[in-house]
Image: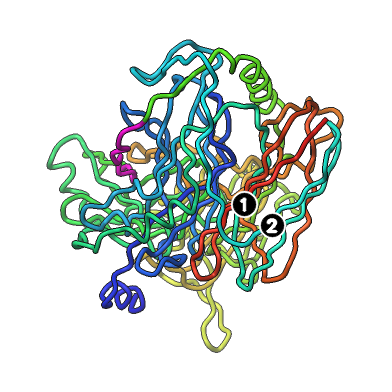
Amino acid sequence: MLTVSASLQGAERIRERVYISTDRDVYVAGDAVWMSAWCLDASNGRLSAFSKTAYVEIHSQQGLVQTAKIALNGGRGAGRILLSNTLPTGNYRLLAYTKLGASEDGFDAGTGARTLSVINTFSTERLPDGVQIVPEVPTAPPVRSAGKLEIRSAAAASPNGTTRLTVSNPGNETIQFSLSVHHDDGIPAADGRRIPDFIDGIHALPQARGFSDTAIPEYEGEVIRAHVTGTDTAGRQANLDRYAFISSPGGGENLYTETISGDGSVTFFTSNIYGSQNMFLEIEDVDPDNICHLEIDSPFLDLSPGEIPPLRLSAGYAPALQLRKIGMQLERNFDADTLYSELPFRIHPVLEEDNCKRYILDDYTRFPVMEELFIEFIQELRIRRTDGRRRVEVIASDATGQYYFPRGMALVLLDGVPILDHEKIIAYDPLLVSHIDIYSGSYSFGIRSFSGIVNFVTYKGSLPSMQFADNVRIVDFQGCSLPLAYTCAGVGKAYPDYRQTIYWHPLLSLAPGASLELECKTPAYGGRFEIVAEGLSGTGEAVAARATLDVR
């Protein structure tokens, strides 16, 4: 925290701006938009290692239509957005920002904005005043090249085959970049903006006018804000200064707790939660006669997209759109984990395996009552009645190696979700449980401490048959997109291959003088394919390179 404070109070305030490179510029509704994020400190033009979460918004001229979150590590991140197949035809603006960057007075996300064209091949609906019909195919806007990066491909490749691409760095600085190989079907982009234009915009920013003091820098991960709602004002006040919990099924890595403040708000400091989750929200020790619950606030700022130009459509697009429509539907129906690979991402495991005692229940005599498990063979657990309530306790040891049961409350989890009323786990059906993990010692989640943890892991991993109290809310939570590389290495003969993007990697790096050889699977059709690289050198110099690949 001292480091964070010093950074924010230093002579030069961090001014973060975010740019998103994508696999292409023109999509059909239902496509996946593959993204690579670049978070720069505008004060020096280099990658910012400060913020750990970037927020992505896709706007039409009428308002916000889709969102995503991207986890950042050293200023870089990756993710994707699955475009809704109900989006009307038209141009959309993609904006990205960090909460720290957006706290600057007069902040404008337009510095890194991109214009994406979306054509709905299932519907004739169009954005209001968002489409112009033109007699001829429009000319593609110019696209800048910059920096030192060389791309070489074979002179030609055959459909349903494999070809190799070579990317070389002849310069004297390490380059981080994204790489896309996609079909060039003659539908031009709405604009030619690339990372060189973003860097120019960074250098042209006016001097900062000030910063909001209410923004919380997301130095470790997303800061989730929530508030208490209830039946009436008295109901809300009755549950202030209590502990609030948020969690999602797993191994306890997505469990956070904080105290509810005097105005009914609560702020959870996370290290980023990944993927779409069922989020469990609970307030501890709620008055049963006055039920309150938590509600998560939207983290998106719904920024102004500025003026978005209309999409210029030509009848000449029809053959290309028919192929795109088929390709999108096949990818939706046949897409499998073998087509993309999960890239490493930063996690902070709370429950360490080295400190775990696991009981696999199938190795023992099965009992129909949970309490019998503790009595017969789980020595580390016991049930104790305190203040008229039964609680599960976890054994601990002192400095001399003597074992004892501490009086502090143990944290009981079911598939990684806290069960604050231990009576519910005591009454739970043990035949649904695969194994029990026990962690002795003291653990802290936020400002809440527990004397030991026990996690009951079910076969399904989804808390089957657990009945929660009325104050528990289960909501859909949009976590950070998993960083994925769409290299399509698993495409086989059984796959009807009409992919438009045939290779995408968002997080590549090349040392000075080094080369990288990549294998690219060609689709079942022929045509010209564009190879596009966007990146930055170690000193913040923009890198943009292009090449072509003929499949015939």
Where disc 1 sits, the SS reads strand
- Judged from this view, the residue extending furthest toward the bottom is 400
* Distance between mark 2 and mark 1 Cα atoms: 7 Å
Indicate how the structure is coloured in the image: rainbow
Q: For the residue marked with disc 1, what is the amino acid?
A: Ala
The N terminus lies in quadrant:
bottom left
Q: Tell me the magenta residue range.
A: 296-308
Q: Are marks 2 and 1 in contact (CB under 8 Å)?
A: yes
Inspect this view and state whether residue 380 appears: yes
Horizontal and vertical percent position of residue 57: 40, 40
Tag 1 residue: 545
Which residue is at 56% across, 50% downward? Answer: 250
Residue 455 magenta = no
Circle nearer the N terminus (2, 1): 2
Where disc 2 sits, the SS reads strand
Residue 324: mark in rendering: none
Q: Main secondary structure of the magenta part?
A: loop
Residue 301 magenta = yes
Which residue is at 24% across, 63% downward? Answer: 207
Which residue is at 39% across, 43% downward? Answer: 95
Tag 2 residue: 150
